[in-house]
Amino acid sequence: MTHDAAELGVGGSVWFQAGARQLGGAARIGLLDAIRATGSITGAAKAVGMSYKGAWDAIDAMNNLAGEALVLRATGGKGGGGTTLTPRALRLIETYRTIEHEHGRFLERAARLLAGGDRAEGTTAENADENADENAGQSGFERDLAMLGRFAMRTSARNQLFGTVTGIVRGAVNDEVSMALPGGEAIVATVTHESVEMLALGEGAPVVALVKATSIVLVADAADAARLSARNRLSGTVEVLRRGAVNADVSIVLPGGAVLAAIVTEASVEALGLVIGKPATAVFKASSVLLGAAG
């Protein structure tokens, strides 16, 4: 009796891992690459099989997590072209593609070993090139890896903001963690002491703040916001206003470039007189902020 044996092969894909947690990255890098190729959000979204809104949400998340602009928004509405990537985004794509390339070379060598082929470690010239690549620009490469790890976080929170811890006030049960966004805005989070220890947070540590869009209250007048008890009050300008039958999806761009999304009722939009280009303040409690270790 004979059996047909399938040929043994080697396959795999690139992802990033932090401890026991596996991180992705390919989908968002693919979106950036599609924007570079098509020059528009609409074209890029179609190319990667994503909705237009989903693409913009991913871009806002990437810009916030990067702490700097990666995608420069074009004017002219939904169908407008001319969307471009910043040099930082272009380098990030190349970093990821380099990792993919080296991973592919590894799989090819592993496949040859399984097939009983060439077992050599590589030529002297090849090794010299690899050593040169390893020594050149290492700090920038490490920064790219940390950013790619932040991109791969899976969370239901619409708002993902990258920043740096500026101070921690210890408490018996909860700690108050202050962080600064790259644009200078400050966020305060109240989390358990155990969470601070688990995330190894300290002054200067990179951190990601997660805030649900439904946890944000909008105020049209910054002076009115100052009278509220919520610790976090971030003022900016209404950039996107998507209205529905009951609720509206509002995006506010902060002076430093970060974008905050809020879900409010249609009645609130009318009462506040919210329109694109009008100032507004996002207000949310410190207890509504979740923290994640970055990089």
Image (cartoon, rainbow, N blue to C red):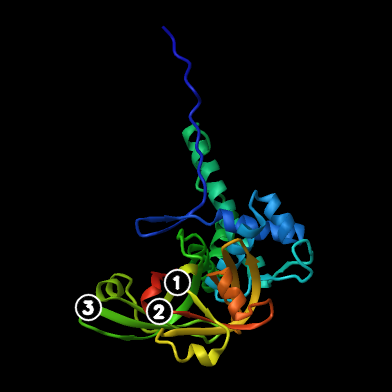
Q: Sort mark 1 into few (<14), some (14-19) or many (20+) by Cα contacts within 10 Å.
A: some
Task: Say above or below: 222 vs 271.
Answer: below
Type of residue at label 3?
A: Val
Q: Where is residue 196 in the image (x, y as percent from the top left)?
A: 30, 75
Residue at left offset 60%, top offset 61%: 245
User: In front: 126, or 169?
Assistant: 169
Q: Position of residue 168 (x, y in %)?
A: 33, 85
Type of residue at label 1?
A: Ser
Residue at left offset 47%, top offset 64%: 157
Task: Say above or below: 178 vs 41.
Answer: below
Q: Please state which of the two labelled residues, at mark 2 or mark 3, is closer to the viewer.
A: 2
Q: Which residue lies furthest to the top in this view?
A: 1
Residue at left offset 57%, top offset 52%: 100
The reply to whether residue 253 is in sight is no
Q: Please give the label number shown on residue 173.
A: 3
Residue at left offset 64%, top offset 57%: 31
Could you say whether the residue bearing mark 1 is in a helix, strand or loop? helix
Q: Sort mark 3 into few (<14), some (14-19) or many (20+) by Cα contacts within 10 Å.
A: few
To which residue does mark 1 refer? 215
- Distance of mark 2 from mark 1, alpha carbons? 8 Å
The total number of labels drawn is 3
- Viewport quadrant of the N terminus: top left
Q: Sort mark 2 into few (<14), some (14-19) or many (20+) by Cα contacts within 10 Å.
A: many
To which residue does mark 2 refer? 285
Q: Position of residue 247 (x, y in %)?
A: 56, 65
Could you say whether the residue bearing mark 3 is in a helix, strand or loop? loop
User: In front: 16, or 77?
Assistant: 77
The reply to whether residue 7 is in sight is yes
Could you say whether the residue bearing mark 2 is in a helix, strand or loop? loop
Q: Position of residue 216 (x, y in %)?
A: 48, 74
Dot 2 or dot 3: first in sequence order is: 3
